[in-house]
Image: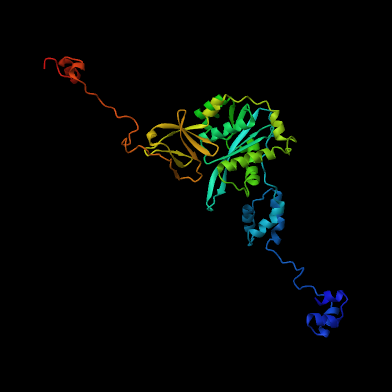
Amino acid sequence: MIREKALKGKSAYAIGNDLGVAENTAKKYMTQPEKKHGLKGRKKDSKLDSFKAYIDELLGQRIYNCVVLHERLQTRGYSGGMTILKEYVAPFRPPQKIPAVQRFETLPGKQAQMDWGIIQCIDEYGITHKAAGFIMIMGQSRAKYVEFTKRSDYYSLIRCMVNAFTYFGGIPETILTDNMKTVILGREAGKPIWNPKFEDFAVSMGFVPKVCRPRKPQTKGKVERLVYYVKDNFLPGRVFRDMADLNRQALEWCRKVDSKRHGTTGEIPLHALKQEPLRSLPPQEILSKYRWESRKVTTDGFISFDGVKYGVPWEYSGREVRVRLLHDHVEVYDGEVRISDHQVEQTSGKIIWLKGQYTGLTEKHGMALPIAFARQVSDKNVEQRPLSIYDEVMGVAANG
């Protein structure tokens, strides 16, 4: 500090007053040359020094495994640790090898890729929940579709695919996915054994399903990268009310990012999508068919959907009904008749009652259908039959 003030032109007297030291002390350090720290510049010997020539020889043989190097050095008397060895070898180690893959660019309308990504959301109580994110991307235009669900089962997959086709305005020739059980049951002689329900769905929609090679996810790299992109760019800091609100925001985000020029293709995805010769959507009745699920009503008048029990009129206990998720409502139908409509409940395990769910149950003794009965009538209206007929029915011989 004395030297710094002296360099600014201050006198020894002024420096002494500023720092609270004697004037002579200030003069001493103003004129005394700066001494180098006693330890500065000293090089500490390393236990590795005498072995470096041998290490260089082993590195020249492309031996970079430090465990192997350490074992060989120990045979020559090395008593040092592994850390200094790793620090010495690190600059010589070649970069990690990543297998090269061929880049594929599909023709317009030829292919879309799809996948699931698991995300985490925190509810208003601070509890973390997992959800599934369905993601589909068009191979040529790079147009995107994202939808979040509570499940990643067959029905959720089909519903999301129908929604994606509707969003894109058509169906590509092929859909490439990984080896998920909802799509493929296994392989025989290297060929996929399709899930029969998914195979029927593909026929109804008019696309050809394809799966990537096992343990080779890079063959569907476009959607793999998009999964990470959604997790890193859409989700962080996102605030939403419920799953329906989150999905509305997801579509807004898709339209926003697809309105910008794509870094790889140089095209604007939404503009390029219009040029893709997609196959026409099937009739609405076919699309609607795949938005429904079947459920059996429990004896106490509930159906289970997405981990939540929703009430229906007790008269439907034990019967099969149709259920669909429409926006943020769960609708239950008997044929074409809607029997209940509930706001979606996001918390699994909840029970949602229906107003008037048990009306009339006591009066009808819990029996929804009329009880079968026999009717007694007067003798003159009863058909007269010989007793031998009853004997034959009971297996009694005619001769008694």
Please provide percent x and percent y for residue 237. 63, 50
Applied colour scheme: rainbow
Please provide percent x and percent y for residue 67. 62, 53
Using the image as rendered, state which of residue 142 and residue 322 is in the foreground.
Answer: 322
* Position of the C terminus by quadrant: top left
Please indicate whether residue 177 sits to the left or right of residue 108 in the image. Answer: left
| Picture residue at 86% right of the left edge, 74% below the top | 7
The residue positioned farthest toward the left in the image shown:
400
| Picture residue at 82% right of the left edge, 77% below the top | 2
Using the image as rendered, state which of residue 127 and residue 94 is in the foreground.
Answer: 127
* Position of the N terminus by quadrant: bottom right
Please indicate whether residue 361 sits to the left or right of residue 4 in the image. Answer: left
Please provide percent x and percent y for residue 367. 33, 34
| Picture residue at 59% right of the left edge, 26% below the top | 208
* Count of marks, rendered view: 0
Which image quarter: residue 215? Answer: top right
Please indicate, yes or no, whether residue 241 appears anywhere in the rendered image: yes
Please provide percent x and percent y for residue 326. 53, 35
Using the image as rendered, state which of residue 29 and residue 163 is in the foreground.
Answer: 163
